[in-house]
Image (tube, rainbow, N blue to C red):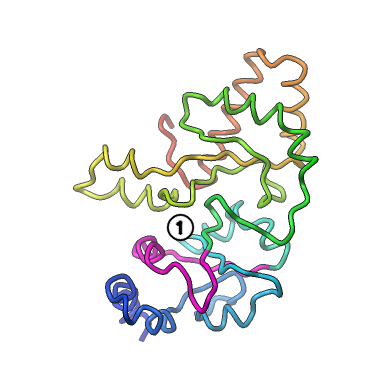
Amino acid sequence: FWNEFGKSIKLGIIEDATNRNRLAKLLRFESTKSDGKLTSLDQYISRMKSGQKDIFYITGTSKEQLEKSPFLERLKKKNYEVIFFTDPVDEYLMQYLMDYEGKQFQNVSKEGLKIGKEKNKELKESFKELTKWWKNALAGDNVDEVKVSNRLDNTPCVVVTSKYGWSANMERIMQSQTLSDSSKQAYMRGKRILEINPRHPIIKDLRERVAKDSEDEGVKQTAQLIYQTALMESGFNLPDP
C-alpha cells in the first residue's frame, strides 16, 4: 500500500491542511532504529527518550548514505532515533509538516539542534579565538558563522544550514531542475555555519597553530581544506571541485 500510494499521501499532507494530521498518521519511513522495516510517527513517539522534545529527521538521497552521515554521530551515541527521508518530495513535505502530536520536527543537518542539556560554555570560550579567525579566513565562502558543535563525535567538523534556508539535499534537488532560476536559488540558499568538534585532534592542533601565527599561509590553506572536506561530507556540491 505504501509503495503504491505513499507519494500521494505525502502530496495530500502538503495540499490538504484540514486533514494534515490524519494523513501524517499514515506516513511510513525507515529510521536508525527501524531495522530496515517501515515505521510510523506514532511508533517513533512511543520510542522517544524521556525528556526528548523534538522528532529528529535527516534528508538525503539514500538510506545507506545517510547512515554514514556525520550529523548522526552524537545522536546515535546518545541513543536517539533519527528518521531517514530519502524521497525528493520529503523536502517539500517537511516545509508543511511542522509538528505532530505536539512534537516539533528538527532537521539534524540544520542549526538549532538541542541534545539534552549542554554544558560547553568553557569549551566555547577556549575556542573563541579560533572560531573568530576561521570565520575571517572563510570570508569569501559565504560562511555566516563558525562555532563549537554539539552534534559531532569523531568527525572534525560539519557544515549546517540556517533553520529556514534550504538543506544541502534541497539545494541539490533545486539545481537539478530543468527550469530552475539561479537568482532565486541564491536567495533561498541557507546561510552556512561551520560547526567544529572541540574534541578532535585536528581542530585542537589548528587552534595551537593559529595561536602561534594567525597569518601563516599554510594554516589558512589547512582551514580552507578542512572546510571544503566538511562541505562535501555534509552533502553540498563544491563550487570548484
Asked if the magenta segment contains residue 144, the reply would be no
Q: Quadrant of the C terminus?
A: top left
| Circle 1 crowding by C-alpha within 10 Å: few under 14, some 14–19, many from 20 | many
> Given the image, on which type of amino acid does mark 1 rest?
Gly
The magenta segment: 80-105
Q: Is residue 69 left or right of residue 196?
A: left
Depth order, front residue of 234/186: 186
Residue drawn at the location 77% of the way across and 46% of the way down = 120
Task: From the viewer's perspective, tell me whether residue 7 is left or right of residue 224.
Answer: left
Residue 20 appears left or right of 49? left
- Residue 185 found in image quarter: top left
Q: In the rendered image of this protein, does residue 94 appear above or below residue 3?
A: above
Q: Residue at x 66, y 61 (%)?
A: 75
Q: Position of residue 109 (x, y in %)?
A: 53, 53
Q: Position of residue 102 (x, y in %)?
A: 53, 75
Residue found at x 71% / y 51%: 153
Asked whether residue 85 is drawn in magenta, I would say yes
- State the residue at coordinates (56%, 37%): 229
Q: Is residue 131 above or below residue 84?
A: above
Farthest residue to the left: give it: 179
As displayed, is residue 100 above or below residue 114? below
User: Where in the figure is residue 234, as x and y percent of width and height?
Assistant: 53, 46
Q: Which residue is mark 1?
A: 60
Q: Quarter of the image for the N terminus: give it.
A: bottom left
